[in-house]
Image (cartoon, helix red, strand yellow):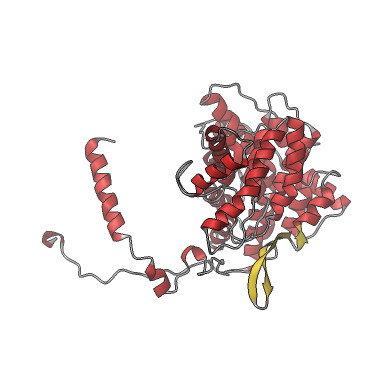
Amino acid sequence: MNADYKNFIVEKCEMCLSNDSFSPDMYAKYDVKKGLRDSHGNGVVVGLTTVSQVNGTKLVNGEKIPARGTLRYRGYDIVDLTNGFIRKRFGFEEITYLLLFGELPNQEELDEFKYYLNQERRLPFTFTRDVIMKAASKDIMNSITRSVLFLASYDDRALDNSFDNVLRQCIYLISVFPMLTVYSYHAYNHYINGESMYIHKPDPSLSTAENFLRILRPDRSYTTLEATVLDLALVLHMEHGGGNNSTFTTRVTTSSGSDTYAVLAAAMSSLKGPKHGGANLKVMDMIDDIKMHVQNLDSDEELTAYLNKILDKQCFDHQGLIYGMGHAVYTESDPRAVVFKSFVEKLATEKGRVKDFELYKRIESIAPSLILSKRPNATSVSANVDFYSGLVYDMLEIPRELYTPLFATARIVGWSAHRMEELITSNKILRPAYVNMQEPKEYLPLERR
């Protein structure tokens, strides 16, 4: 950018700031729900769903008070679901069936569904070379999104929104997402980092979690515990209510009549935003910063003092946040974090990372009271699932560039369920209203301006 153009951009930015700004008081004056949230921070209800339910409060005498967090998939408590498969079988495929079709499968139905998922887990001939390996990027989310859009070119029925066709497309994309994710990373790692290229084929006899580790690692090896913890992570991140940003994007774009590939590319673009899909990366960066600046990590006093500095915007990213603590809905606990935690400890023991796990536990113990002391309106704060997921991925030797793409590999199941539900239950385009703040102006001809 030359100097003149740079000055032009700076000048026009000032014009935008002047013409697009107005007092925050206007939101209250016109009863506008900024961020689709009311004055208490509750999401504005815009639709109905049976896919999942998130709750972090209970009603007592007509008043909402903090409560143990619950997450339900199709009415089933996530704790019951995970207890039902953990240590017995991998759960990703079973819970995918539940979210897509609304019922838990029996053994025959599960075997049939796993067979079709594995049959679909293949990319078009030369797609890896012609699309994924072209224009490799460190931004793996953009690379995957590009691949999703390109896949539409290989689908003769790409624009067909009949329900059976959309279901076929969703199952296909769920099947190939691990390949799109890992192959995009290997292309980046080879062409930009100068490392060796590995393009391993998935094994149809393995689960989604096993295949992810198999095609990611040069030697294709993994332990049962590693695959079990990754499988659990995928299930816990699979769906989280219709109100999160990327799922709402899915429903908004679906309501316009757009095709499956475009809809899921839009959801990907939403998820890649750091306010949505990058939370565990911020936790990891924060932990790195703590390790760098706290001399004695075994001292609760020193750790508390530094966490206070983070909250006071004196260090780390100066945003005043302890990342991984607190949630928009959950108050006393995040059920995903509760389920995850015991397996994080097992993995830490296997990996020789118990000291790291202990640091996380101490931060989880210390942080809530510090946060509440500085936020008088808050009543309860707990660790959310992102607090531990970054540590898990690190112990699984998953590169940080893949943290958000791995989230997408799980969440595409929820997006698919919500897309189909939107197609079935609504024929209206989602169209929110905005209050216009601009006074009418008299037009002046160019020669009089």
Give the camera-side residue of 312 and 190.
312
Q: Residue at x 60, y 21 (%)?
A: 196
Q: Residue at x 57, y 34 (%)?
A: 291
Q: Give the residue displayed 74% in from the left and 61% down from the top.
A: 74
- Residue 235 seen: yes
**Which image quadrant for residue 442?**
bottom left
Against 407, residue 221 (above or below) is above
Residue 34, percent from left and from top: 46, 65
Of residues 317 and 118, the one nearer the viewer is: 317
Q: In the figure, is residue 416 to the left or right of 118? A: left
Task: Give the residue furthest to the right.
Answer: 107
Residue 428 versus residue 322: which sits nearer the camera?
322
**Residue 52 placement, left or right of 31:** right
Quadrant for the N terminus in the image: top left
Q: Is residue 55 left or right of residue 15?
A: right
* Residue 123 visible in image: no
Q: Position of residue 407 (x, y in %)?
A: 63, 45
Residue lying at the far front of the rendered structure? 301
What is the count of numbered marks? 0
Determine the image quadrant of residue 446.
bottom left
Q: Where is 177 relative to 413, above or below?
A: above
Depth check: give the residue in front, 101 or 299.
299
**Quick one: which residue is furthest to the bottom in this view?**
61
Q: Is residue 439 above or below residue 359?
A: below
Residue 50 screen position, x and y as percent:
70, 65
Work out which quarter of the rendered image holds the C terminus and state it: bottom left
Instruction: Choose top left, top right, bottom left or bottom right for residue 424.
Output: bottom right
Residue 250 at what x, y percent from top left?
58, 57
